[in-house]
Amino acid sequence: MENTKIENTITSIKKEQSLILQKSKDIAVKDDKQMTRASEFLSVVKEKIKSIENNRIFFVKPLNEQVRKINGEFKKILEPFQETERKIKGAIGSYVDEQNRIVAEKRRKEEEARKEEAVRIAEQVSSF
């Protein structure tokens, strides 16, 4: 039913469009009389533009409102999942950071032990 209304409206607009576009080909402004006719025709065109936009809004507004409502409902449903996702990512990140810290500390201690061993060996060699 609604599609038929839209189709009928569009068909009617297209018929008028053809007529207006045909008439617009004859527009020329070379004297005051033609200026008056062009201004009057411009008013008709502007009214047609306004009418078409009003028709578009008439058909689209309820759909946009429905889309907003659906998006709002899904956003409410998604929020707890997104918060859970952030918490899990945070926990994973903290674990990875801690593991990296442990590895870095182990490397630092190993490097320190190697330096101490090198100093000990150097002292032994120099005492010969």
Image (spheres, rainbow, N blue to C red):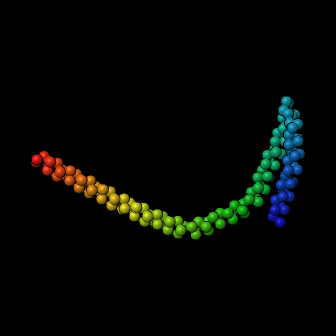
Residue closest to the far left: 127
Residue located 23% across and 55% down the image = 113
Residue 100 appears at what percent x and percent y?
36, 59
Residue located 53% across and 69% down the image = 80
Residue 8 appears at what percent x and percent y?
86, 58
Residue located 30% across and 59% down the image = 106
Q: With respect to residue 20, does 77 lie above or below? A: below
Q: With respect to residue 18, does 87 lie above or below? A: below
Compare residues 59 and 98 and report the one nearer the observer.
98
Residue located 78% across and 56% down the image = 55
Q: Is residue 34 visible?
A: yes
Residue 51 appears at what percent x and percent y?
80, 52
Compare residues 41 and 112 and report the one nearer the observer.
112
Q: Which picture quadrant has residue 74?
A: bottom right
Q: Which picture quadrant has residue 11?
A: bottom right
In the image: residue 97, left or right of residue 43 = left
Compare residues 35 and 7 and report the one nearer the observer.
7
Residue 2 appears at what percent x and percent y?
81, 64
Q: Quadrant of the N terminus?
A: bottom right
**Number of numbered discs visible in the structure rendering:** 0
Compare residues 46 and 81 and report the one nearer the observer.
81
Residue closest to the far top: 30
